[in-house]
């Protein structure tokens, strides 16, 4: 993983703490739903955290975080 990809992962991880990462990924509808349900009772939030850590989370176009 190069520097830019690592930077995107770190940015997404920081936003994940505040449940704002889905806005960064271009998914505003699921971002609002996640925020209103407290991260799906934190289950959805924890799954997203794992996906960010493993670089398996995708943006609104289906691209992996490292492919942006």
Image: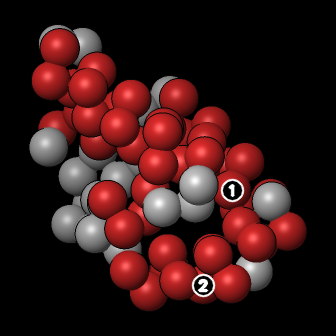
Q: Which residue is mark 2?
A: 33
Give the SS element for disc 2.
helix
- Which numbered marker is on residue 26? none
Percent from the top left, x then y, of residue 25?
A: 31, 60
Nearer the N terminus, badge 1 or badge 2? 2
Percent from the top left, x then y, of residue 22?
A: 43, 64
Residue 47 visible to the viewer: yes
* 52 is higher (above) or lower (below) than 39: above
- Image quadrant in which the N terminus is located: top left
Please name whichever residue, 12 or 52, is drawn nearer the observer in this view of the structure: 12
Compute the Cα span from label 1 to label 2: 11 Å
Please name whichever residue, 64 or 36, is drawn nearer the observer in this view of the structure: 36
Q: Is residue 6 left or right of residue 34?
A: left
Measuring 35% from the left and 53% from the top, which residue is drawn there? Answer: 58
Please name whichever residue, 48 or 17, is drawn nearer the observer in this view of the structure: 17
Q: Residues within 10 Å of mark 1 (few under 14, many from 20)?
A: many
Measuring 28% from the left and 69% from the top, which residue is drawn there? Answer: 26
Residue 56 visible to the viewer: no
Percent from the top left, x then y, of residue 10?
A: 39, 29
Furthest residue toward top: 2
Q: Is residue 35 left or right of residue 8?
A: right
Q: Which residue is mark 1?
A: 45
- Image quadrant in which the C terminus is located: top left
Q: Residues within 10 Å of mark 2 (few under 14, many from 20)?
A: few
* 3 is higher (above) or lower (below) than 46: above
């Amino acid at each position: 993983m190069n520097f830019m990809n690592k930077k995107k992962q770190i940015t997404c991880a920081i936003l994940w703490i505040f449940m704002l990462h889905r806005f960064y990924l271009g998914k505003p509808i699921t971002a609002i739903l996640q925020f209103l349900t407290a991260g799906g009772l934190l289950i959805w939030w924890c799954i997203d955290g794992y996906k960010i850590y493993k670089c398996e989370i995708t943006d609104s176009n289906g691209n992996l975080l490292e492919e942006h």
